[in-house]
Image (cartoon, rainbow, N blue to C red):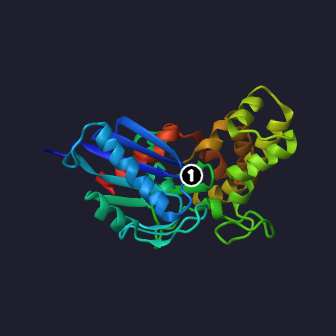
């Protein structure tokens, strides 16, 4: 019985998304669980196992029909050994040998990498990064993740930790970040910060989706929030555009749902603050694969590394 399917897992600070894909990376089934329901490391590992086993069972598959499992996690990873060093926005994860734990339990091959690198692979293979050789992909959500393709290859850095744009300091002083740093980009434009600003302005709890909807209708309060997010992001990206002379920046994740007002502010800030030659070159594009990019990218890890 030949292996015909791949399971991809996108583990985020908000949701755990699992998908069953065929060899052409077409999604056949999908499960979404709320990450914060699992209060500790073991609970979350059990949820990953539950999601994988559910996809196999619900689709009447035998494990021999599954080529392997790919997982993208929101933090630095030793991808050769499958060790998660730590997860800034999910407590209790330090040097977790996740590959070994899951392979022993599931009896399936497991590949693990950073979630933003997985998203980058997906956009480079199937999305809006296909035409370019030098790109930065961002995923904006609970955290801010990044991955880079340089010269047509995924750039990992010596410790597979390259691309962590969410932990780029954008000020000399500022809020302490979950990673231990000070004034990291993520502390200004992560979900928690945006929702806190929204509560303060509207005097009630408001979702990102509602905030985006209001901005699309011209609501001044929500427009001001998204403009601020766009400026902070643009400042961080301006330095990277100048240093790396990128062809394109691909932006995905829940925050990217803000749409035109966010993207216009990012583009305007880069135009004003990057060197002119580099600023004229770079294109700022929305991720094509949207919420499925992480799952598809994790599946690519299984077959292509």
Is residue 223 found left or right of 61 in the rendered image? right
Q: Is residue 50 above or below residue 217?
A: below
Residue 177 x %, y %? 70, 66
Q: Quadrant of residue 60?
A: top left
Q: Is residue 89 above or below residue 20?
A: below
- In the picture as drawn, the residue positioned furthest to the top comes out as 217
At x 78%, y 49%, the residue is 196
Q: From the top left corner, tell me how far across and down residue 101 is, in percent.
A: 36, 66
Q: Position of residue 202 (x, y in %)?
A: 85, 39
Which residue is located at x 65 percent, y 45 percent?
280
Q: Nearer the viewer, residue 236 or 17?
A: 17
On the question of residue 176 being in view, the answer is yes
Q: Does 167 sit left or right of 33 as displayed?
A: right
Task: Please state the horizontal and vertical placement of residue 228, each as a whole percent of the image.
Answer: 79, 47
Look at 47% across and 40% down and name the residue there: 292
Q: Residue at x 81, y 28 (%)?
A: 218
- Secondary structure beneath disc 1? helix
Question: Which residue is the site of mark 1?
Answer: 37
Q: Quadrant of the C terminus?
A: bottom left
Report the side of 42 relative to 82 (left or right): right
Would residue 256 be found to the left or right of residue 68 on screen? right
């Amino acid at each position: 019985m030949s292996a015909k399917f791949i399971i991809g897992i996108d583990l985020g600070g908000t949701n755990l998304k699992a998908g069953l894909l065929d060899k052409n990376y077409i999604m056949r089934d999908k499960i979404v669980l709320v990450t914060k329901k699992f209060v500790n490391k073991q609970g979350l590992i059990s949820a990953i196992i539950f999601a994988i086993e559910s996809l196999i069972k619900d689709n009447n598959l035998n494990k021999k029909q599954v080529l392997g499992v790919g997982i993208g996690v929101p933090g630095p990873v030793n991808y050769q050994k499958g060790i998660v060093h730590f997860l800034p926005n999910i407590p209790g994860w330090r040097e977790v040998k996740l590959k070994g734990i899951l392979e022993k339990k599931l009896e399936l091959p497991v590949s693990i990498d950073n979630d933003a690198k997985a998203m980058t692979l997906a956009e480079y293979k199937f999305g809006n990064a296909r035409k370019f050789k030098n790109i930065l992909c961002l995923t904006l959500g609970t955290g801010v993740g990044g991955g880079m393709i340089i010269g047509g290859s995924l750039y990992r850095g010596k410790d597979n930790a390259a691309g962590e744009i969410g932990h780029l300091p954008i000020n000399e002083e500022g809020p302490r970040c979950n990673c231990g740093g000070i004034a990291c980009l993520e502390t200004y434009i992560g979900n928690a910060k945006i929702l806190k600003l929204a509560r303060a302005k509207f005097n009630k709890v408001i979702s990102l989706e509602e905030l985006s909807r209001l901005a699309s209708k011209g609501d001044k309060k929500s427009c001001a929030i998204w403009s601020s997010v766009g400026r902070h992001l643009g400042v961080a990206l301006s330095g990277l555009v100048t240093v790396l002379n990128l062809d394109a920046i691909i932006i995905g994740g829940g925050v990217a749902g803000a749409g035109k007002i966010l993207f216009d502010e990012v583009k305007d800030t880069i135009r004003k603050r990057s060197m002119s030659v580099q600023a004229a070159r770079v294109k700022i594009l929305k991720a094509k694969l949207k919420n499925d990019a992480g799952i598809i990218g994790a599946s690519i890890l299984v077959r292509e590394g």
